[in-house]
Amino acid sequence: LAQVPSSLSNSLLSLPPVGGEPKHIMGMKYAAAYLMAVLAGTESPSAADIKKILESVESECDDEVASKIVSELEGKTVHEVVAAGKEKLKAFGGGGGGGGGGGAAPAGAG
């Protein structure tokens, strides 16, 4: 999935749970539905598009949350959001190669 802009992520996490779902799951399902609509060919999905996708899998949809994600992404393409997210991830750096095996025994040991 694309990196959700921090302003959007923070907005979604501050909303009350829908149907008892944890807040992080609630936010992700709206982002996922938005991305599915884009993959289906809708360049700028609406709150109604998100609602239709969520309801198709019998998931509750809070119109306020759906509208919030649409307004946060208005005027942006998914490609721009993904590219911006990749740039932010560069700040985390890469992980090391792990611990590697133990060193070889010194010559003549044993």
Image (cartoon, rainbow, N blue to C red):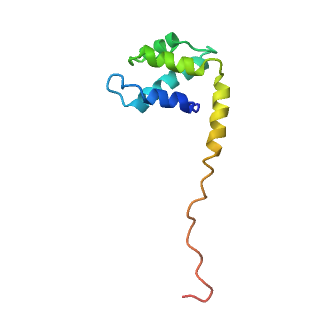
**Is 99 above or below relative to 104?**
above
Asked if residue 85 lies left or right of residue 48, the reply is: right
Q: Position of residue 1 (x, y in %)?
A: 56, 31
| Residue 17: quarter of image | top left
| Residue 71: quarter of image | top right
| Residue 87: quarter of image | top right
**Is 95 above or below relative to 42?**
below
**Is 43 above or below relative to 84?**
above
> Camera-side residue: 77 or 57?
77
Asked if residue 47 lies left or right of residue 73, the reply is: left
Classify the position of the C terminus by image quarter.
Answer: bottom right
Q: Position of residue 51 (x, y in %)?
A: 46, 13
Q: Position of residue 104 (x, y in %)?
A: 60, 77
For the point 63% across and 50% down, which residue is it?
A: 93
For the point 59% across and 75% down, which residue is it?
A: 103
Asked if residue 12 lies left or right of residue 19, the reply is: right
For the point 44% across and 30% down, which residue is it?
A: 13
Residue extending farthest to the top is 48
For the point 45% across and 19% down, which residue is it?
A: 65
Q: Position of residue 46 (x, y in %)?
A: 55, 12
> Camera-side residue: 53 or 44?
44
